[in-house]
């Protein structure tokens, strides 16, 4: 059986070499199509991975809060906040997959330099843990990052907000907001640093301060939520299930639940690259179909002769399908090698993409190398070319022997 299959495969390879120019064009188009699909898919996967990591780094792999925190608007600051934060953190850190637990306080209010006031979106954090766990997620343009344990009330300002208030490191500003009891409270702070998130609209409003200053400003010991950082992304769902059972009175969301930008980009890219892959696949199928149709027309009398010598239609159909497999397979493997080479080259020779809409900074172009995607694409290309060859050959191999021999 193996010898027979090897013989038919050998015939198929020899037949594809009869018209080398036509075979080369077919293989080239299949290779370019495969490379385009793999490069586009790798770019999409790389984008998904980068956005997922950024979302998890921003909020935590899991977010713990009261049910109302995620479903209702607050009438007063921290109305749906968490109490007993120290106890909760101790219990959470007891889980072996939990690497760090970071409290967060969201504050809306005004910030003023004495002459001008503007709206702010402030976030209270534990500076040492926040910047240590999340890494360099901000670009410092002046001054220094916040540090835990400071005796002064300090803040970091977005670059746009600092420019609007004419603030520099060392400037004195005033924060104004409602307390948890509904009263108005103000606090003088000193600017320690100025940063950029890469999103100008956010830089015009964002303020970072330490958790102690935020709680003093709001006159409370509560926090808005706890961000739970895990040892790896794959631990997200198992740990969520464990914590949901451990804290039934609270809600445990995943980073995905709050990553609206990630979900929107993924849905958009899936449609774009799905349509692109379909179009490329159709082009490759038509090219292979055309090449095989021309080859079969040229060899109709030959096929009739083989039929007259006792060759079965199924055997002829199989060898013609193998010819399509050879053309598609060689093209797919060549395209995969080209895609792999370009993907690896980007790690050696970095290429920066332009800044996307709404951002002020570009990002390095990377193409993910996913074995599953490579295997699936190669298998699909080979299968499509075999089916295309079989479809175009079915009429000729079943033609009456007399008609095939008389074909001109």
Image (spheres, helix red, strand yellow):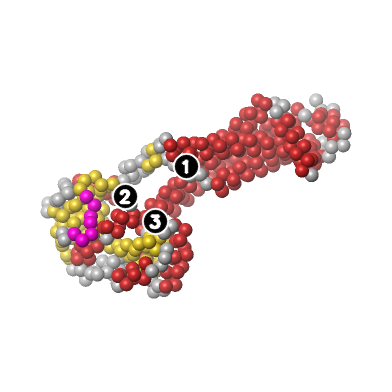
**Which of label 3 and label 2 is nearer to you?**
2
**In the rendered image, is residue 397 in sight?**
yes
**Which of label 2 and label 1 is nearer to you?**
2
> What residue appears at the point 42 percent right and 69 percent down from the top-left corner?
243
> Outermost residue toward the left?
114
Mark 2 or mark 1, which has the lower sequence index? 2
> What residue appears at the point 16 percent right and 59 percent down from the top-left corner?
152
Q: Quadrant of residue 377?
A: top right
Mark 3 or mark 2, which has the lower sequence index? 3
Please tell me how many numbered marks the rendered image carries: 3
The residue singled out by tag 2 in the image is 136
In the rendered view, tell whether residue 310 sits above or below residue 166.
above
The residue singled out by tag 1 in the image is 367
In the rendered view, tell whether residue 183 sits above or below residue 292.
below
Q: Per the image, is 146 magenta?
A: yes
Left of 45 or right of it: where is 306? Answer: right
**In the rendered image, is residue 36 in sight?**
no
Magenta part of the protein: which range?
A: 144-150
Q: CA distance from mark 2 to mark 1?
A: 23 Å
Residue 79, percent across and down? 28, 70
SS state under label 1: loop
Q: CA distance from mark 1 to mark 3?
A: 21 Å
SS state under label 2: loop
The reply to whether callout 2 and callout 1 are in contact (CB within 8 Å) is no
Left of 58 or right of it: where is 217? Answer: left
The residue singled out by tag 3 in the image is 56
Residue 328, percent across and down? 64, 37
Mark 1 or mark 3, which has the lower sequence index? 3
Residue 31, percent across and down? 59, 35
Q: Per the image, is 115 magenta?
A: no
> What residue appears at the point 18 percent right and 59 percent down from the top-left corner?
150
Q: Quadrant of residue 12?
A: top right
């Amino acid at each position: 059986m193996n010898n027979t299959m090897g013989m038919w495969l050998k015939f198929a390879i020899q037949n594809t070499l009869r018209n080398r120019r036509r075979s080369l064009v077919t293989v080239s188009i299949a290779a370019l199509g495969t490379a385009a699909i793999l490069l586009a898919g790798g770019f999409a996967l790389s984008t998904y991975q980068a956005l997922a990591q950024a979302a998890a780094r921003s909020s935590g792999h899991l977010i713990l809060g009261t049910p109302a925190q995620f479903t209702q608007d607050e009438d007063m600051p921290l109305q749906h906040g968490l109490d007993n934060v120290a106890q909760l953190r101790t219990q959470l850190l007891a889980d072996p997959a939990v690497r760090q637990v970071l409290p967060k306080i969201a504050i809306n209010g005004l910030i003023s330099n004495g002459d001008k006031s503007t709206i702010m979106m402030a976030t209270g954090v534990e500076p040492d843990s926040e910047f240590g766990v999340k890494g360099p997620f901000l670009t410092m343009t002046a001054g220094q990052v916040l540090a835990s344990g400071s005796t002064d009330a300090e803040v970091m300002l977005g670059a746009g907000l600092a420019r609007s208030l004419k603030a520099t490191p060392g400037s004195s500003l005033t924060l104004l907001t409602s307390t948890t009891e509904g009263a108005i409270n103000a606090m003088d702070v000193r600017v320690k640093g100025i940063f950029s998130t890469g999103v100008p609209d956010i830089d015009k409003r964002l303020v970072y301060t330490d958790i102690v200053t935020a709680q003093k400003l709001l006159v409370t010991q509560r926090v808005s939520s706890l961000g739970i950082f895990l040892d790896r992304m794959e631990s997200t769902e198992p740990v969520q299930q464990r914590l949901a059972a451990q804290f039934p009175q609270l809600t445990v969301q995943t980073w995905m639940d709050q990553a609206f930008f990630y979900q929107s980009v993924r849905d958009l890219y899936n449609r774009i690259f799905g349509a692109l892959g379909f179009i490329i696949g159709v082009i490759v199928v038509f090219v292979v179909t055309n090449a095989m149709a021309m080859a079969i027309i040229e060899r109709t009398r030959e096929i009739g002769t083989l039929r007259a010598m006792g060759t079965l239609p199924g055997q002829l159909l199989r060898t013609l399908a193998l010819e399509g497999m050879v053309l598609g397979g060689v093209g797919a493997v060549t395209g995969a090698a080209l895609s792999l080479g370009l993907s690896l080259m980007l790690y050696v020779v970095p290429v920066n993409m332009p800044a996307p809409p709404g951002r002020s900074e570009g990002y390095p172009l990377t193409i993910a190398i996913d074995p599953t995607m490579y295997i699936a694409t190669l298998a699909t290309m080979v299968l499509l070319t075999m089916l295309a060859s079989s479809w175009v050959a079915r009429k000729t191999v079943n033609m009456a022997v007399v008609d095939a021999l008389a074909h001109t």
